[in-house]
Structures are given as structure tokens and as C-alpha cells.
Image (cartoon, helix red, strand yellow):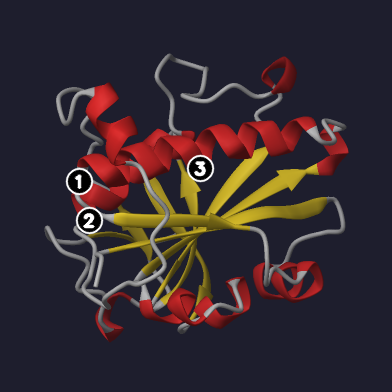
Amino acid sequence: MRTLVTVSAVLMLSAAVFAQDISLPAPQKTGGTPLLDAISARQSTRDFSDKEVALQDLSDLLWSAYGFNREDKRVIPTPRNSQEISVYVFLKNGVYLYDAKSNVLIHKAAGDQRKSVGAQDYVYTAPVNFLYMADESKGMGTASNVAVGCAAQDVYLVAASKGLGAVVRTGGLDPETLRKLLKLTKRDVPIAGQTIGHKK
């Protein structure tokens, strides 16, 4: 049985929480920057500081990417409601799988693995990287790219509303390396990565 760790307001992820799941605070689903203001502020950032992202902000970003806004429906559309996308979170101390139903990050790999999720230098500087994977066994094909695009845009808008930087990218993703690291099968295909953090 896994251990759930409640982390304080900021991601102070030390050795004490290595190899453990992380319980996220409930996402904030109302308020924030008006939508049109967030769209106006949305931009791609490639110059990040290494300042940690608040755990509440991380929870909000993950919910906007792939959480539930109805009992069994996601905040983004997926083809035929297949819900074939998975979101992995690469932090300085390890890799986690986002479990939206439980609002928990499930530990998948220890240590700083950010270099395995992108070739760009800023990937190793920014404290948070999302990896969007699709389960090809559900047969959604290129429609999965549309779903990931919706998730990434939601993250862009929430990041903009919080004064954070973000950039989505497809370069530097090695399927075999990622499958080995995360113990996945051939049916699991990386679609895109998204780097998130404070602007430098």
C-alpha cells in the first residue's frame, strides 16, 4: 500500500518524500484572471528560473490539463470520451503520474529525470515538466493529438493567469527511453511535453 504525503504550500520536495505519492490540495475551480485576459497574456516562455512552483498552482494546472469537471467527464474533450491520455509530472526529485480521481501524484521513478523528457536546456532549469502520453490500444490515432492540444492550451491559460511561464514542445521525446523509465508498453506513445515554471 502506498504512502500519501501531504506537502505544504510550496514544493519543498526533499529526500524525506522520495519514492512516495504526493497528495495534492483541491484544485481551485473558480475565480482567477478573466478568460479573455488570460488568452491575451498567453505566450510561450523558454527562459525559466529554478524557483519552485507552489503546490496549489501545480494542482490547478494539472486539473486544467486533465482533471474532471463532471463526475466522469474530463475538462478536455477526448474522442468518443476514450480518456486515453495520461499526464506524467517530472519534478526535481522524481516522476509522477497524475491521478485526477484521487487528486494524487503517483510515484513512478526516483531522482531528477528531467533530461529524459526534453533536449532543450530550459527543460532542466524549470522545476515542472508535464509529459502527455496516449494509449494507442484505444485506437484514437491522431485524434489524441487534438486532445493533448486542448490540455496544453488549458495549461497555458492557467499559467498565464498565475503569472507563470509555459511552453509546449514535441522535440526531444525518445519513446523507448520514456517507456523504459516509466515501465510502459509499446501501446503508450508520448505526444508532447510541456515545461512550466517562473519566468526568469
Query: If you read the primary sequence from the N terminus, does the residue marked by circle 1 or circle 3 appear first?
Result: 3
Please state if 66 lies on the left or on the right of 56 as rendered.
right
Describe residue 171's horizontal placement relative to residue 105 as left or right. right
Asked if marks 1 and 2 touch (Cβ < 8 Å), the reply is: no
Amino acid on which disc 3 is placed: Ala
**x%, y% of residue 44?**
42, 54
Left or right of 11: which side holds 122? right
Across the whole image, how many numbered discs are drawn on residues? Answer: 3
The local crowd at label 2, few if under 14, some if 14 to 19, many if 20 or more residues have their Cα within 10 Å, is many
Q: Nearer the viewer, mark 3 or mark 2?
A: 3
Residue under numbered circle 2: 55
Residue 56: percent from left, percent from top: 20, 48
Q: Position of residue 164 (x, y in %)?
A: 25, 54
What residue type is disc 1 on? Lys
CB under 8 Å between discs 1 and 3: no
Quarter of the image with the C terminus in it: bottom left
* x 31%, y 63%: residue: 197
Amino acid type shown at disc 2: Leu
Mark 2 or mark 1, which is nearer the start of the sequence? 2
Q: Which residue is mark 3?
A: 152
Taking depth in this image into account, of 105 and 32 the one nearest to the observer is: 32
Of badges 1 and 2, nearer the viewer stands 1
Give the residue pinned by disc 1. Answer: 162
Mark 3 to mark 2 CA distance (whole Å)? 19 Å
Q: Earlier in the sequence, mark 3 or mark 2?
A: 2
**Which numbered disc covers residue 33?**
none
Please name whichever residue, 37 or 57, is drawn nearer the observer in this view of the structure: 37
Mark 3 surroundings: few (<14), some (14-19) or many (≥20) residues within 10 A? many
**Category of crowding for the residue at label 1, using alpha-carbon neighbours closer than 10 angstroms: few (below 14), some (14–19), many (at least 20):** some
Q: Secondary structure at mark 1?
A: loop
